Image (cartoon, rainbow, N blue to C red):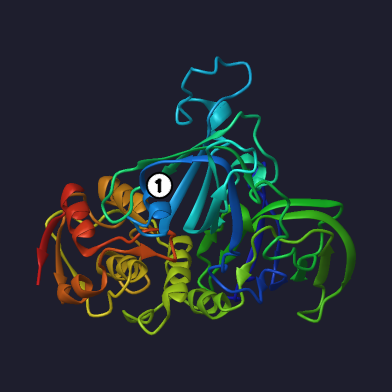
């Protein structure tokens, strides 16, 4: 049986195969995962501080605020005294900004001569698509400030301000677009433009569809005979892949190409970013076999659970064997535990060497998720709430 091509391009509309190729130049790039954030300086202009921000200014509380949520205080066309709930208002929801790892660095009387303050902060934006990536200020008259819950605290109002200097502006892409994609060693045939989902094909023929970030879109601008085989061609497109994989991912994908991990804990020597990449690769390559029968007891090897991503690696392997997946985060663990993704819901899980996680997964601020750290006690409560019969050893 001939070894199948490594990559398959599936038409986004019909799902039919457009072509297959041996390799893709521009899919794996020299990038670090996760991307290190760029810290910025912001000024809350004409600010009336309250709660934790007031305490930081007065010296009665820490100058580190954690996560600062910024909401439009008033949208044009709505009465000034009418409260707008961003969670219920589509117009406001996409104007909310989150600043992460925020610290107070200074303050002074407001330049407008009022009894308010101009307050200087450092931090970085939560990099999502709110408010057009933070490039344009929303149409609002002032902003409400909220410090979101850290270390078990509830969200607290932190005052309001008239404007925010340094936040709404153009920013360089932390990862400038890579070179245009070149499909190497393709079956000939495609011409014109391509809009395709990408699928990774193992040597046994198993096909794993990738996510939208890895779609191949663009116009074919060059075709040449390929060095990958007689009758094959290389196709160069005029656009890059939106979110290429890290260069360090290639070894993982080569392993899954040849069948996947053959023994557990191969992820254990990896750093936190490497473990996250492992979980992502496991998610994309997971099998979709029927759930195993009820009554099976699963054993989680806890010797290497020293961070949140290690828990997902170990849980996936406990349920679905080496390289197995049972969630990339708590949302997906919830989905798997409720609907089954290898185990019939309501299963029994024995967590061996749980003292390792208890010692490492402690309260704090996680500078990988930029959120309050997920603790061992959080995980225990979560698993029990999801119907898992949990035994700690």
x, y percent for residue 355:
15, 75
**Quadrant of the image occupied by residue 238:** bottom right
Q: Is residue 111 left or right of residue 306?
A: right
**Quadrant of the image occupied by residue 171:** bottom right
Q: Is residue 180 visible?
A: yes
Q: Is residue 119 visible?
A: no
- Between 282 and 41, the residue placed more toward the observer is 41
**Quadrant of the image occupied by residue 90:** top right
77 w.r.t. 360: above or below: above
Q: Quadrant of the N terminus?
A: bottom right
Q: For numbered disc 1, what is the local secondary structure?
A: helix
Residue at image position (35%, 49%) is 331
Q: Quadrant of the C terminus?
A: bottom left
- Between 168 and 7, the residue placed more toward the observer is 168
**Residue denoted by label 1:** 54
Residue at image position (60%, 53%) is 42
x, y percent for residue 57:
43, 53
Q: Is residue 237 left or right of residue 80?
A: right
x, y percent for residue 219:
84, 54
């Amino acid at each position: 049986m001939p070894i199948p091509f490594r990559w398959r391009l599936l038409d986004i509309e019909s799902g039919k195969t457009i072509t297959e190729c041996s390799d893709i130049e521009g899919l794996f790039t020299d990038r670090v995962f996760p991307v290190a954030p760029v810290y910025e300086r912001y000024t809350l202009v004409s600010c009336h501080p309250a709660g934790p921000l007031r305490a930081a200014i007065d010296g009665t509380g820490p100058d580190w605020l954690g996560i600062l949520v910024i909401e439009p205080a008033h949208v044009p066309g709505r009465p000034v005294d009418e409260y707008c709930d961003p969670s219920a208002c589509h117009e406001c929801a996409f104007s909310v900004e989150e600043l992460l790892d925020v610290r107070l660095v200074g303050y002074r009387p407001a330049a407008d001569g009022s009894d308010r303050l101009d307050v200087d902060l450092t931090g970085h934006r939560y990099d999502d698509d709110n408010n057009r990536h933070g490039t344009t200020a929303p149409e609002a008259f002032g902003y409400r400030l909220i410090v979101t819950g850290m270390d078990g605290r509830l969200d607290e109002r932190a005052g309001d301000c008239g404007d925010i200097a340094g936040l709404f502006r153009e920013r360089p892409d932390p990862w400038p677009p890579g070179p245009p994609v070149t499909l190497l060693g393709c079956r000939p045939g495609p011409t014109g433009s391509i809009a395709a989902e990408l699928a990774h094909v193992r040597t046994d023929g198993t096909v794993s569809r990738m996510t939208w970030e890895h779609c191949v879109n663009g116009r074919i601008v060059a075709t040449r005979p390929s060095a990958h085989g007689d009758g094959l061609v290389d196709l160069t497109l005029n656009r890059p892949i939106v979110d290429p994989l890290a260069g360090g991912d290639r070894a993982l994908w080569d392993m899954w190409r040849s069948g996947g991990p053959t023994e557990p804990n191969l992820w254990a020597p990896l750093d936190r970013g490497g473990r996250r990449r492992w979980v992502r690769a496991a998610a994309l390559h997971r099998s979709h076999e029927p759930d195993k029968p009820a009554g099976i007891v699963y054993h989680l090897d806890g010797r290497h659970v020293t961070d949140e991503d290690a828990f997902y690696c170990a849980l996936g392997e406990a349920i679905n064997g080496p390289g197995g997946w049972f969630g990339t985060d708590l949302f997906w663990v919830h989905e798997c535990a409720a609907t089954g993704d290898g185990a019939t819901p309501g299963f029994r899980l024995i967590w061996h060497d749980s003292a390792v996680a208890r010692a490492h997964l402690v309260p704090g601020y996680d500078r990988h998720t930029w959120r309050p750290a997920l603790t061992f006690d959080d995980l225990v409560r979560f698993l029990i709430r999801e119907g898992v019969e949990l035994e700690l050893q």
